[in-house]
Amino acid sequence: MLKNQIHITVDVEEWFHSNWFDVSECIKKHYDGIYPESDVLTTTEKLVEMFNNYNARATFFVLGETAEKYPEIMEILTANDHEIASHGWFHNKKYVDIIDFKNDILRFKEEIYQDVNGFRFPNFGYSTEKFKFLIKNGFKYDSSIVPCLKIPGWYGNSKAPIIPYDLNLDGGMAIKEFPMTVLPYLRLPGAGGWFLRNAGYHWTKNVVKFSLKRTGYGMIYIHPWEISDSNPCIKDIQFHVFRNTGQKTFENLERLIKTFSEYNFSTISDSLSLNSGNAK
Ligand SMILES: [Zn+2]
């Protein structure tokens, strides 16, 4: 495992994949039940361009449903040599059963990207059985565990390691886990996304800074819709869900990359020294 690395991770999904509000109700009420187009393609492209400007290579956890709608996303990631990993197929089935999960994984490999190493569970819906299925299907790592204090209804596992580790399952099986970066000791979350927008640049910078100082490991995460200026303004969606999305978050993300420019921004597969899984 390489030291002094920061992994930028992007969950490539659309604004309506958020689990903060009742999406199907919202789509029914405001869009006549038809999921609208989004700017996920242009926002993903904007992220790629910015990362390229800083020679930062990132890992993109792509949602199958989104890649199917916007196949150019895969072309952009491949052409720019970033890593393509999987975020499953559907996002809004919060309690996906194991059969659906297995079908989703196989469908992603068959229709979107065969040579994939990494997985991130939508809505943190992992289980031992699901991890085993990933291993059997060639996945080399997962990046879904947030080793912070438990936030009820959201996530958190304060007993989990804060640096990459072997997640041992029964039967001698193991998968590498690349956890989200949290504030060491206090175990508070904040390395991107919702926190970058709602708690601000300095909070995220400090979470990453103290983690790097303590462990040499840092992971930042973001969603393309978080840098979009055209998220819906619907009054039954709570204020914090889209707060500070757009140019402000784009600039804060860029500022983070500049702040940590003495570190290496590599893909997770690079850190694991895996050759496949990187877009070539
Ligand atoms: Zn997601």
Image (tube, grey):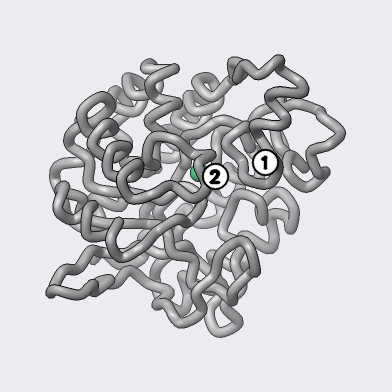
Q: Secondary structure at mark 2?
A: strand
Residue 100 drawn at (x, y percent): 35, 41
Residue 54 drawn at (x, y percent): 44, 40
Q: CA distance from mark 2 to mark 1?
A: 9 Å
Say if mark 2 contacts mark 1, CB within 8 Å: yes
Residue 197 drawn at (x, y percent): 71, 48
Could you tell whether 172 is left or right of 217 in the image?
left
The amino acid marked with disc number 2 is: Ile
Residue at which label 2 appears: 222
Q: Is residue 96 above or below residue 28?
A: below
Could you tell whether 210 is left or right of 22 in the image?
left
Residue at which label 1 appears: 249
Say which quadrant the C terminus sits in: top left
Which sits in the foreground, 142 or 247? 142
User: Quick check: can you spot residue 79?
Assistant: yes
- Residue 51 falls in which quadrant of the image? top left
Counting other residues with Cα less than 10 Å from the Cα at mark 1, is it few (<14), some (14-19), or many (20 or more)?
A: many
Residue 191 drawn at (x, y percent): 56, 59
- Residue 263 falls in which quadrant of the image? bottom left
